[in-house]
Image: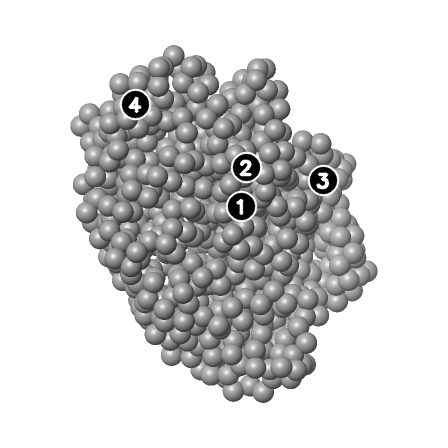
Amino acid sequence: MKLAIISDIHGNLHALEAVLRDIETLRVDRVIANGDMVNRGPNNVAVMERLAAEGHELTLGNHDDLMRKWIDRDDDIPASWFDDPFWKATAWSARQVAEAGWIEQMRRLPMTLRIEAPGAPSLLISHGSPRHYREGYGALLNDEQLAEIVQMHPADIYVGSHTHRMMERHWGAHILLNSGSVGAPFNGDPRAQYLVLTLEEERWQWEFRAVSYDREAALSAFEELGYLAEGDLSAQIFYEELIYARPLYAPYWMWAESQEKPMHWPTWHEFHETYQEFLVLPDGATLIQSQTVSRGNHLNLSGAAMTESSLNPLDWTTMQPHFDALLATELTQDSVRPWLRRWSDLEAQVEELGAQVYREVSENIVDEEAEKRFLLFLEEVLPKSSIANQALKEKLLAFEAFTPYEDTEQLLKRFRADAAIFREENVPLRSELLKLGNEYEKIIGAMTVDWEGQEETMPQIEVRLQDLDRVSRERAWQKMMARYAQERETLDKLYLEMLAMRRQVARNAGLASFREYQWQEMGRFDYTPEDCFTFHDAIEHEVVPFAAELYKSRCEKLGLDTLRPWDTAVEVQGEPLTPFAEAAELEEGGYRIFEQVDPVLASHYAIMRDGYLDLASRPNKAPGGYCNSFPVTGKPYIFMNAAGTHRDVSTLLHEGGHAFHFMESKDQPLVWNIGGPMEFCEVASMAMELLSAPYLAKSKGGFYEEEDARRAYASHLREIVLFLPYMAVVDAFQHWVYVEAPENVTTNELDAKWSETWDRFMKGIDYQGLQTEKETGWHRKAHIFTSPFYYVEYGLAQLGALQVWRTALQDQAKAVADYRAALALGDTRSLRELFEAAGATFSFDRQTIGELMRLIREQLDSLEGQPA
């Protein structure tokens, strides 16, 4: 079953026609016009006739009912309104509708429509809420109101309209969807917007769509049909709402009442002048003919909708019965697919909770309640989830008659690897390791430095390494190192504890080393440790000499005799790049760039701007940056510590790539297939940095003047070259730690190995007199503590990203199309196949890397007008 929910047409025939044409391409079974077909626009009668001709179902909206009440001179309408010029537009619409004979039908329209299907979640459709057509589903509905709605009108999914803004909201086990507006959107996007719901395998999926139409013709109709002339001021306001795709009528009314001013032309002009900054013309959206704005799906467990009890993984008693039911289910070739879907839905609930509690502790590391929830998740939820999932994996793998589907072949491979290394005695150890990793982040996140009487976070003090004053740079670097030194003993002790625990995990699994364990746990099926050594060798021979040249060039441009650690971030061509002052500017600039790369990707980002971006640095915020995803809510989340540097721009573009990976793949039916192997997840992020590079200039939507945009682009290419040797240090160090280091390894030995590995790959930075700072560099790499072996992915992915970029240099549109197609595959293909889908090869030998380094040299020459 497929439904289209169209609403708030408001007499906009041109928008309606465009939406109906779009619906024809989707093979929809039922179209429901969810209220407010008329008023606010000039083509009321034509809209009603068009809907009637198609035989579409209708519900009652407040404007439809207003037409009836106006004609009846209903007591609900203040008597003064009938003679008030401000209401002339309503009077005009009511006459048009009444003279055409539509009032009687409006009297009979239902407030709600309920959609039921065997075994599927129930839908309740209403213009506002089922309680009142003016109570729209939006952010202002509080928990008490929602509880009353659910109690009085039980359903699983509530579909409403009225607010003219598309929305998806999860409340306990229930989902609220708002279809937006066909004829008068209020979200800044002028396209006609509506909702499509599809029932598949006892599960509702939804898709918000936006369709371009002839807005010039729609606006002309206001004058041609006499609406502007007859409707007076209110018709003018409706006309401008259509222009700006923003609400003006209600804000003006509330403003006038608050100022105790009459609603007439003089006060309208005053309001217009006062709120001029609010009246921004929409940009770019009309270029797209038809677009999916976002998608989602409803979780349907154990063959029945979640109605009586909300699933809450923090209370495992609400989860265990569903796992038990799955474990007791007899598998057949026909039943295994829906069985997997129901299991996937349970896993999505756990992942959603994990993302939420991690978000909470990241945003405020001193929030004790957040930490309690996080620890409860680590100590209670994850162990029980792990054990329950293992039982289901063993059940599936024991079902030998199962013929895998195309999207389960890789999944089964991962399940086999998981099952092979699972040991119940490792469950508490893994939880403890996660807690220790969180402890590392708390230590680092709490670090501050006193700078001239001001307390600054580490990301903020790091910005001072770009100061043109070398004395200031050195002082900032030394202060940072001194602050880390205060935690040296604590970090040493923490890591040795984690190292011993990880070795025990491997022994429990019957494996010779934690590297062997981690290789299986991370699903590294396409390359071996020996391949990593080949990669290290290629970097040493093809990249390290190039990096040394870049360091030497930097040293010469700065007029220095030797390049010290505090000299590696300062701009060699003048003042540091300052792309923004406030995080809000970064957020807006990111949207403009993504819109240039691809409008659909920009629409993904726009969804995140409603509470799923935390960009600014502040005290008591965890360090670093990441993108996490909420598979139930259907949204990604970006966390970072912006301080006004170009690195912040790069971080947003990078994490944006991760977010787009989630959004492009979230329609995969099984939660395990959303995203992809970690190596390709990083292709998604790193390729986005390079695909965005041509749009860094203000003239193309970015942050910089043309010269600074070229500086930023060139700087990014140099950073790629300089990163690969550092990546090799981090990776080679961990191979030694987990395979060759003695059982009773000391922190002095760890320091010595880091220093030795650093000297092998990092040529060109002078650490004379700074041996302690150099050898404890591993303390400052979070991955070594929190994500062992998760770093070579960045290097492998950078090779894939550079190949996507190589295509983009010749054909940007093709590169973006291949990129999106590869992301949409999720985790359903091998790593090599995903690289191929993106237009790259999974290779990391000297020849491949040498070719890519030569390409970077050429582009640097082009950007800077001289040899790199």
Q: From the viewer's perspective, is the residue at label 3 or at label 1 nearer?
A: 1
- Measure how far apart labels 3 and 4 are at the Cα level: 43 Å
Looking at the figure, which quarter contains the C terminus? Answer: top right
* Residue that carries the numbered disc 1 in the rendered image: 534
Instruction: Name the one closer to the observer, 556 or 325.
Output: 556
* Residue that carries the numbered disc 2 in the rendered image: 689
Q: Which badge, 3 or 2, is on the more N-terminal residue? A: 2
Q: Are marks 3 and 2 in contact (CB under 8 Å)?
A: no
- Measure how far apart labels 2 and 1 are at the Cα level: 26 Å
Instruction: Name the one closer to the observer, 72 or 136.
Output: 136
Q: Residue at x 58, y 74 (%)?
A: 340
Amino acid type indicated by mark 1: Thr
Amino acid type indicated by mark 2: Glu
- The image's mark for residue 241 is none
Task: Answer above or below: position of 800 versus 168.
Answer: above
Which structural element holds mark 4? Answer: helix
* Residue that carries the numbered disc 4 in the rendered image: 473
Q: From the viewer's perspective, is the residue at label 2 or at label 4 nearer?
A: 4
Q: Which badge, 1 or 4, is on the more N-terminal residue? A: 4
The residue most toward the top is 559
* Residue that carries the numbered disc 3 in the rendered image: 814
Task: Answer above or below: position of 251 versus 437.
Answer: above
